[in-house]
Amino acid sequence: MGKKSLGPNNDFCPQTLFLYGTRDEQGNPDFGLFCWFSYIWDGEMGAMCCIGGDKLTKDNIKRSRVFSANLVTEELLPVADYLGCVSGSNPDKMKIPLEIGRGAVLDVPVLEKSPVVFELEVTDIVNKHDGDIILCKIRNVLQEESLSSDETVEQKLKRVAPVTTTAQTYLSHDGRSLGAWGEPMKRL
Ligand SMILES: Cc1cc2nc3c(=O)[nH]c(=O)nc-3n(C[C@H](O)[C@H](O)[C@H](O)COP(=O)(O)O)c2cc1C
């Protein structure tokens, strides 16, 4: 297979999307959209993520050392796209209708409409020049009760409809394009 050499990029390597929930200094919830999220092993499963540049999410995580990671579904995509395109430095960012609850174990804001939510406690932060790699202990996984049914994984995933992204495009679980970054928020 002929291949060409390119600079660093991860096109055609789809990534699962999460909305990270944090609290600002006043205790108000903030949500941002993130895809650089994966898992680690240290005696049990943990989570890792990378947050680049300056973001309210990063400031909040560094201060509180806890956050939630809420799986993005097709239903949540318009709001997720908005939360990924609007900075937390905009004081009006969170003035949108969102059903927000609290974690069962940690005091982190969680999205009621997300079917799978990780409650994460930071154990290590690796500071690079323009980004931070954050390692976390998974303190709890909130999973929608209906996902404990006897259906197959395939049937459950179809129902959950998680959204992935690559090449600045959102994709459904079965590979349909759900629009370029910045498009789904126009439906809000
Ligand atoms: C599809 C998508 C995925 C993103 N993934 C990441 C990511 O993994 N890491 C990151 O640092 N920023 C990522 N961003 C950018 C943040 O979501 C964006 O800067 C957001 O405004 C942060 O919100 P905050 O300022 O409230 O923290 C992503 C944006 C989009 C649209």
Image: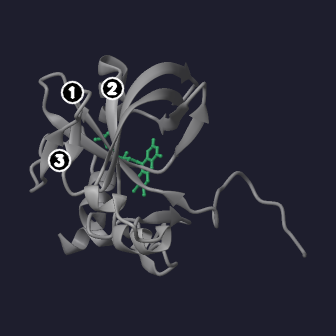
Ligand 1 neighbours mark 3 (CB distance < 8 Å): yes
Q: Height in image: 10 above or below 28?
A: below
Looking at the picture, which amino acid does disc 1 mark?
Answer: Asp
Q: Which of 127 and 102 is in front in this view?
A: 102
Residue 167 spot, x, y in % from top left: 56, 66
- Which residue in the rendered view is the most extreme toward the front? 150
Q: In which quarter of the image is the N terminus?
A: bottom right
Query: What is the CA distance from the residue labelled 2 to the residue labelled 3?
Result: 21 Å
Tell me, for residue 107, which label it has, or none: 1
- What is the secondary structure assignment of the residue under circle 1? loop
Residue 77 spot, x, y in % from top left: 31, 65
Dot 1 and dot 2 residues touching (CB under 8 Å): yes
- What is the secondary structure assignment of the residue under circle 3? loop
In the rendered structure, the answer to whether residue 169 lies left or right of residue 69 reads right
Which residue is at 24% across, 61% downward? 79
Which residue is at 63% across, 63% downward? 11
Query: What is the CA distance from the residue labelled 1 to the residue labelled 2?
Result: 8 Å
Q: Quadrant of residue 68?
A: top left
Q: Height in image: 140 above or below 152?
A: above
Which residue is at 51% across, 19% downward? 124
Looking at the picture, which amino acid does disc 3 mark?
Answer: Lys
Q: Quadrant of the C terminus?
A: bottom left
Report the residue marked by disc 2: 66
Query: What is the CA distance from the residue labelled 1 to the residue labelled 3?
Result: 21 Å
In the rendered structure, the answer to whether residue 82 lies left or right of residue 149 reads left
Tell me, for residue 93, which label it has, or none: 3
Q: Can you tell which of label 2 and label 3 is closer to the viewer?
A: 2
